[in-house]
Image (cartoon, grey):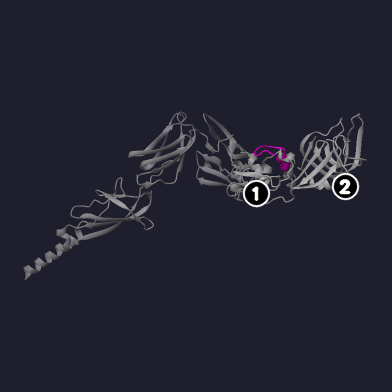
Amino acid sequence: MWALGLLLLVGVAAVAAALLAWPQARLRDGGDGLADAGQPWLAGHVSKVVVHDAGGRAVPVRLSGARVEPVRQLPAGEKVTVEVTVQRPGWAGWLVGRTATRSFTVRTPEAQLRGRWLEVRNGGPVSVSFTTPVRIVVLRGPGTNATLRFPHGQKTLRLGTAGAGLPQAGSVSVRAVARTWERLPPPSDVHWFPARAHVQALVTPALGGEIAPDRPITVTFSRPIAQAIGSSLPTVSPAIPGSWQRPDSHTLSFVPRGVGWPIDGHVRVVLPQRVGVAEGAREHLTQTLEWDVSRGTILRLQQLLAESGYLPVEWTPAGDPVARTPEAQLAAATDPPAGRFHWPYSNTPKELRGIWRTGKWNEIVRGAVMMFQDEHGLDVDAFVGPQVWHALLADAVGGRRRTAGYSYVFVHRSVPQLLTLWHDGKVILTSPGNTGVPAAPTKLGTFPVFEHIPVGTMSGTNPDGTRYHDPGIRWISYFNHGEALHAFPRASFGTPQSLGCVELPLAAAAKVWPYTPIGTLVTIEN
């Protein structure tokens, strides 16, 4: 009995020892794979591998030998769950179980840059280094567009030589993965600078060039911001809506809002301290950064003036209208959409039609700009500068439109001399008038009204050299230097009698005057 009991006890102990000490399913670093599912002796063979991503979705994999390889791309640095099922040896299955399943958490390898701000001596190598060897590297930058694939992982990659194959200062966008089955991460920028005692800076866009109205200004320093310029922020002029942002410890970026930098204007940024700015082979110490803002196109100017009711033509876009957002309107100012202009009235005077030129500056556009300036409280000089563009874009975003209609005046110098006032498809008035005598003829051409007053004094020199001074002249619209439409008491009208002006009977002048605000075109023809 003692012998049987001892034998039974030994058997139970052996079974317990086998259950406790039998090799379990395991997972090891997989080299180029996600993991290595190779099992120790007696553990059995892998019969099934199931992988789930961080969101619990199944990840298709294949076994290449013992190596687990994802069939679809996975992000770098993502946690995944690997469930391994092993089939025990048949002779041991009765004792330790026919199968065993274990779950493991694995993180896909993540290759991070060891340094993003490099100070390199002239003629020295510019290299990027990674925390783990990489197999695929994508480089993007000025003059650089490469995708590199390595049969074996590389921890350091040489880009070139500073001051020789590469500029003294520059940037390159880098994306890298440690495994060929990983999805490329978002790009990271690597910057290099000349090695100097003072702080260096890379400025985007390049100094002295043009800046788009909605483009941010970015300054990247060779050293942390606090060390480079202290705690004060740069000042920006002109002052526009926007804010300084810090994408990283070395970079400041001013992001404009609203309608952005003034089109056709000038931008200046003053740094709290001087820095070295490399431009090609040159470098200079400066606190002031300057750019000219891109010009708006004449075509978009015409489109905006037409949409806001300042032109005798209408404009219809070929596609969807430009959205009433600052971003969309800014983009269209320098890259106008396709579309067509058309005359809304069949009886538009041929003289007016003959002046129009799509996409080119002409007197119709000049008059419309002057009218727009006058109605928006701007200097009336027909110069389409930053203030005009800003007001135009603000009206476009706000959907504001002038509703007073379009007027046009044309005067025939041939006898009998006549003035015709046309407005929005209707002839409002035709009246005899007097133009200049042969010694002081009214100049032929088309001119916009530049001064509009109900009563004033007109003075000047007669052809015989004497002076005239006529107070109380009514309903004056100056259109070419001292030449104007106005009322004047004459015994008759329809022949040359003035000193260059177009004289009208009082009643006719009173009717014409409200239709001839600043910017209205007046054509004098034979």
Residue 417 got which mark?
none
Quadrant, the C terminus: top right
Residue 50, how many percent across, how many down? 30, 56
Vertical comparison of 181 with 191: above or below: below
Q: Amino acid under label 2?
A: Ala
Instruction: Note whether 4 is above or below 150 in the view shown.
Output: below
Name the residue tied to disc 1.
396
Residue at x 45% of width, y 43% of height: 188
Q: Quadrant of residue 285?
A: top right
Which element type, helix, strand or loop, lies under badge 2?
Answer: helix
Q: Secondary structure at mark 1?
A: helix
Depicted 88 relative to depicted 110: above or below? below
Q: Which residues are magenta?
A: 356-369
Mark with earlier residue (2, 1): 1
How many labels, in total?
2
The reply to whether the magenta stretch includes residue 385 is no
Indicate left or right for 468 with 296 as reference. right
Residue beneath the point at 65% across and 52% down: 398
Judge left or right: residue 385 versus residue 232: right
In the image, taking residue 231 as reference, residue 4 lies left or right, namely: left
Camera-side residue of 6 and 102: 102
- Along the viewing direction, whichever of 245 and 271 lies nearer the viewer: 245
Q: Nearer the viewer, residue 515 or 328?
A: 515
Closer to viewer: mark 2 or mark 1: 2
Residue 397 visible in the current orientation = yes
Q: CA distance from mark 2 to mark 1?
A: 39 Å
Residue receiving disc 2:
507
Q: Position of residue 265 (x, y in %)?
A: 65, 39
